[in-house]
Amino acid sequence: MWNSNEELDIEKAGDDANKLVLLGSALKAGIFQALDRQKSLATLKEELKADERALFIVLEALCSMGYVDKSHDRYIIADKARPLFLLRGEEYVGGYLPHFMNILKSWLLLPDIIRGERPEREPVPRDIPVFMHAMASRPDRIAEEAVSQTLMRKKDAKNVLDLGGGPGKYSRAFVERGLKAVLFDMEEVIDYVSTAFNLSQIEDLTLVKGDFTKDIENVLENVLNEKFDIVFMGNICHIYSENNNRKLIRQVHDLLNKNGMIAIEDFVRRRSPHAEIFAVNMLANSEEGNTWSEAQYREWLKDGGFQGIEVIDLAKKGKQLILGFKA
């Protein structure tokens, strides 16, 4: 993650960017998966239906970086690369790198965006699997910290609404702490994550399809007919404008039980070391996204009917947790 306090070595940063693109390209082309055992160039070419010249150049570059080993003209993924690209543990980056490649395309449009042009972006539904796997690749401890901090301040909570919860990291963590959870997200997201991440098999987790920027109250009333002790909004506010965030917070107020809590996890300007640079990412990848200050969050929550507002620094990812209670 970006840190504004670090000096930027432009030459090294460019070299690192080249390496990241190479690793992401090799991953998307299936090279690392295919090299779980030794293979010759000819075998790999046939298996991947690849161009021989391109495959040779990429493999040799990966060897020079230490991510692929070569012996007697046969290639195999290096031991240090297995946890990164094959083993789905804490070190796994196979979910993040394809998402990084998509983000990079948008960042390269920044000169046009700065000039006020609105370059055509690729359709979002096509990228849902990549985006969901990127979100799911975050270590569980990141979600667990936010959930723990929330429940420390709302110990009597019995149920939670996870808005835009995607792959269900936060919903799972709430369920594991004994709450009933509802994950509310777009239809195409729910269709994908319900099977890709086995969310439909989790007891005490209900999946609800809808657009929470338009029809959240109607959908929840018709499907569930219940209110919530907690509404959790993880990585939501940076997608939307100030006016739309105000509107969403007012709607959340109406979805809560008496003394219910809103919990917002996001980068807060001038409090997170990553907030200002992440705002550029939202400039490149959204129509109205930004990162917002603590004063703005406090104003939105107060105007939306919340009190006891608290902002907590999360240790695991340089984000903040903004909490408030229904007045």
Image: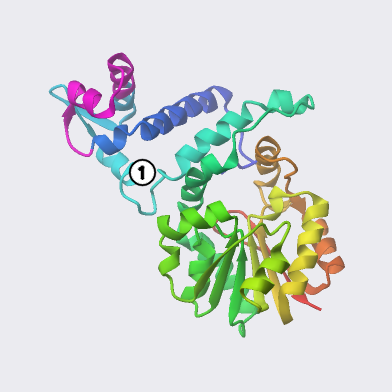
Furthest residue in direction front, as rendered: 222
Q: Residue at x 52, y 58 (%)?
A: 190
Judged left or right of residue 22, residue 142 is: right
Q: Main secondary structure of the magenta part?
A: helix
Coordinates of residue 242 in the picture (x, y in percent): 81, 52
Q: Is residue 318 magenta?
A: no
Q: Quarter holding the C terminus?
A: bottom right
Q: Residue at x 29, y 38 (%)?
A: 33
Furthest residue in direction top, as rendered: 53
Seen in the picture, residue 146 relative to 196 is either above or below; the reply is: below
What is the secondary structure assignment of the residue under circle 1?
Answer: helix
| Residue 83 vs residue 122, the one in the foreground | 122
Q: Residue at x 69, y 37 (%)?
A: 280
Coordinates of residue 4 in the picture (x, y in percent): 66, 40
Coordinates of residue 221 in the picture (x, y in percent): 68, 73
Magenta residues? 36-60
| Residue 101 vs residue 50, the one in the foreground | 50
For disc 1, the marked residue is 84
